[in-house]
Image (cartoon, rainbow, N blue to C red):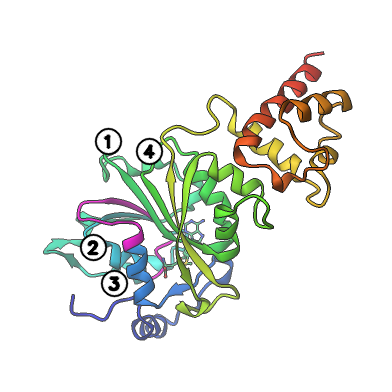
Amino acid sequence: MTEIPIGSKLRTTAIINKYLMRAKKALGQNFLIDPTILSGIVTAADITPGDQVIEIGPGIGSLTEQLLVAGAKVLAYEVDTDLEPILMAELPTKIADKPLAERFKLLLKDVLKADFKADLAGFFDLEQPIKVVANLPYYITTPIIFALSQSALHFTSLTLMMQQEVAQRLVAEPHTKAYGPLTLAIQSEMRVNLALAVDRHSFMPAPKVDSSVVVLIPLADSKLGTMDRKQFNRIVKLCFAKRRKTLNNNLKGLVSPERRTLIFEKLALPAMVRPEELSLAQFLQLVPLIMGHELAQTSK
Ligand code: SAM
């Protein structure tokens, strides 16, 4: 590659000026201009030649270019149609002597409306592993993570840049402020590793907060077993509805006093325990007991 990388301050500034672009705040457009962070993402995602990668929000192609250079085949979802001509003009026309079209496909659509199986068929071999790599638009970070984790396709890994505060919630331990429903929803289905801390000045324009790159690996067997995911997440949310109150207090509208006593005894929970003091393993025991009660009530 003879050109300066797209994900450098110099080239990004040149592209923005050339196309008289304005980064669209409403679409979470903060472009990466730090080559060290870009190579850190490629390393964290463990990209090797031939990897099949879904990218969400290629923007002007900073990360896309590095994924392609590392040998990946990339299918990218981009909702901003204005970016198509820029991407197609700025990405290298050939990668390892092959035309770009063999290695890159752009889908101009909202990733939240994606039908991954249908979209990928014909470009990716659906029998082979598929990774997701993205510098996410922050306004939809959690819906995207849920959409990816609940897809019919089993992704090998999700390497995602997100705002630091959300990353902290994903990796949180009990007894901390960040620990809550999002932590439990994700950790019950995925292994989560914090890969990189990213300063806000690594982006153009710089967002108001710092970011982190997180690697999520879907578990072969969800810790939920046969439990319904939506039910589990809904009940965990109710357990945390009033964070400052005890678990017992949060369960008041859900479970009768007698049954609460039984549940607390069965799980050997202290009467004044707060929701953030329970481990994932304890929630996995608690939720079915609460659900059993709910079912008994609704069947009356
Ligand atoms: N990948 C580029 C980079 O690292 O510099 C741009 C990342 S920027 C944070 C997020 C990108 O996601 C933008 O290009 C934005 O237009 C796109 N985007 C926003 N909402 C989207 C959606 N619902 N579906 C697909 N792309 C979306």
- Does residue 61 appear in the picture of this structure? no
> What label sits on residue 127 in the rendered view?
1
26 is higher (above) or lower (below) than 192: below
- Disc assigned to residue 117: 4
Q: Which amino acid does label 4 sit on?
A: Lys
How far apart marks 4 and 1 lie (CA) works out to 11 Å
Of the numbered discs 4 and 2, the one sitting upstream in the chain is: 2
The numbered mark, 3 or 2, whose residue comes first in the sequence reads 2
- For mark 4, give the secondary structure: helix
Residue in the picture at 20% in, 51% down: 50
> Depth-wise, is mark 3 or mark 4 nearer the camera?
4
Asked where in the image residue 56 lies, by quadrant, the reply is bottom left
Taking the image as shown, residue 115 lies to the left or right of residue 272, namely left
Nearer the N terminus, badge 3 or badge 4? 3
Q: State whether the magenta stretch is mostly helix, strand or loop.
A: loop
Circle 2: residue type: Ala
In this rendering, is residue 159 above or below 152? below
Calculate the distance from the C-alpha at mark 3 to the C-alpha at mark 2. Answer: 20 Å
Front one among 210 and 29: 210
Which amino acid, mark 1?
A: Glu
Give how far apart the Cα atoms at labels 3 and 4 are.
28 Å
Are the two marked residues, 4 and 1, in contact with CB atoms closer than 8 angstroms?
no
Q: Residue 70 carries which label?
A: 2
In the rendered image, is residue 34 in sight? yes
Horizontal and vertical percent for residue 156?
Answer: 36, 44
On the image, the x and y values in percent for residue 51 come to 25, 51
Q: Quadrant of the C terminus?
A: top right
* Magenta stretch contains residue 52: yes
The residue that label 3 is drawn on is: 89
The part of the chain drawn in magenta is: 43-61
Front residue of this view, candidates 26 and 292: 292
| Crowd band around label 4 with a 10 angstrom C-alpha radius: few (<14), some (14–19), many (20+) | few
